[in-house]
Amino acid sequence: MQNDEDMLVIPHKELSVEALCGLIEEFVTRDGTDSGYTRGSRAENVAMVRRQLDAGQALIVFDNRTQTCNIVPADSVPAPNRA
């Protein structure tokens, strides 16, 4: 079971352009996940995720327990953890 201390929201605007682009690209091309970003081209999917991050509809979350980063819907993150 994961507790709130295991999850850290990373404000996307604090990442370098290169780091953010790399993270989004990895996310939309990730194998074995149901990210829902499979209908458009890679560029379209990257742009869609970027818009969702900019609008606050998606968040970047670092899981301390697994040492992994993910992009998730904002409403799936408990309010105290949101930036």
Image: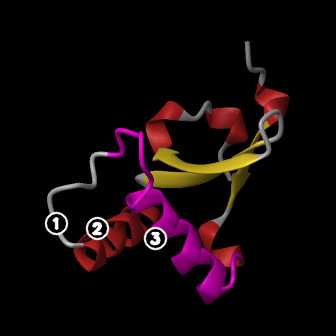
Tell me the kind of residue under disc 2: Asn
> What percent of the width, then of the height, locates residue 53?
46, 64
Is disc 1 in contact with disc 3, using a CB cutoff of under 8 Å? no
Q: Quadrant of the N terminus?
A: top right
The vertical placement of 34 against 51, above or below, is above
4 or 24, nearer to the observer: 24
| SS under mark 3 | helix
The vertical placement of 20 against 2, above or below, is below
Is disc 1 in contact with disc 2, using a CB cutoff of under 8 Å? yes
Q: Disc 3 marks which residue?
A: 25
What separation in Å lies between label 1 and label 2 (alpha carbons)?
6 Å
The residue at 62%/35% (across/down) is 79
Tell me the kind of residue under disc 3: Glu
Q: Is residue 58 left or right of residue 63?
A: left
Residue stretch rendered in magenta on the structure: 15-35
- Mark number for residue 45? 2
The residue at 29%/73% (across/down) is 42
| SS under mark 2 | helix
Q: Disc 1 marks which residue?
A: 40
Q: Earlier in the sequence, mark 1 or mark 2?
A: 1
Label 3: few (<14), some or many (≥20) within 10 Å?
some
